Amino acid sequence: MSIIRWIAAGDNHGHHVCQESQEALAVHIGRWKPTVRIMLGDCFDFGAWRKGATPEDQEEGINDDLKHGNYFLRKVLKPTIFMQGNHDIRAEEMMQSRNGDRADNARRAVQSYTDSLQAIGCKEIHRYSVKGKSEADVNRFRIGKLTGCHGFRAGVNATRETARTLGRPGDVVIHGHTHDFSLCTIEHLEASIVGVSGMCMMDITKADYALRRLATTKWCNGWLFGVIDEKTGDCKVWTAHRFQGKFICSTAYDLI
């Protein structure tokens, strides 16, 4: 059986990245050796451009954010597929600002991560949109029976609704955005659809805006990985998550 090894990670949020998670991911990539590497979105935080950003957020700027986000792209994940997230697209939106300095900084930010994606030879870049003139304009990728997006839903039913919307019979649907781990199965007469959320790669304690929300208690660090049968498209997904202070993840598999 000829298989494709894949790995998917996201929501590192630029300078909010969890260094321990990032280092563990780099080690796992070196051992797992995936040929498909998926960035699930929100590689950058761009908190200075968040609606309702505080003066402190705005003073923070984007330089540190770009430094850490580009390092994640160029040195750690080196994605072959890049899914733009709702935080990433803030730079494109800010390019339309009437404030000349903000618009110039936004153009610099977009050019910066575009240069990184070109440098690593990223094959697919998908904008954060549900509609578009081409596949690149839609926030969805497909390889065999693996499909996914950054995510447009939040709340307890986010994974189920994402899998129901994107999935075809027999698919595994993965997504970022929610920062938690969720697994669900959607019933279908032909073949069930599996939905999985991809956790996050950020230092959760740095998310000041979310530390007073009960939903944040579900957030956890980790990533997804698996295999795809090149002939049938069948897909298997595993999780890498914290276990006794480390990250538990496989680097091999057996068919019995």
Image (tube, helix red, strand yellow):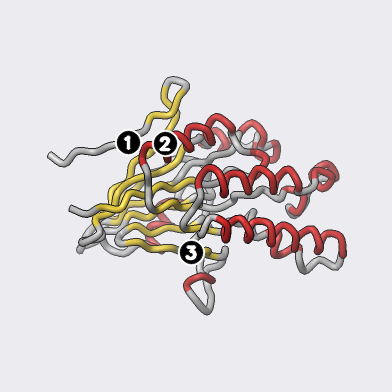
Residue 57 vertical placement versus 130 (above, below):
above
| Residue 76 horizontal side relative to residue 174, left or right | right
Residue 130 vertical placement versus 220 (above, below):
below
Residue reaching furthest to the top: 244
User: Circle 1 — which element?
Assistant: loop
Marks 3/2: CA distance? Answer: 23 Å
Kindly identify the residue that appears in the image at 75 percent across and 59 percent down.
108
Q: Are marks 1 and 2 in contact (CB under 8 Å)?
A: yes
| Residue 5 horizontal side relative to residue 80, left or right | left
Viewer-side residue, 188 vs 81: 81
Kindly identify the residue that appears in the image at 60 percent across and 34 percent down.
204
Marks 1/3: CA distance? Answer: 25 Å
Q: Earlier in the sequence, mark 1 or mark 2?
A: 2
Residue 217 picture location, percent across and down: 55, 33
Residue marked by disc 2: 28
Residue 211 vertical placement versus 197 (above, below):
above
Viewer-side residue, 15 vs 130: 15
Mark 2 neighbour class, 10 Å CA radius: few under 14, some 14 to 19, many 20 or more: many
Residue marked by disc 3: 124
Q: Are marks 3 and 2 in contact (CB under 8 Å)?
A: no
Residue 255 picture location, percent across and down: 16, 41
- Kind of residue at badge 3: Glu
User: Circle 3 — which element?
Assistant: strand
Residue reaching furthest to the left: 256
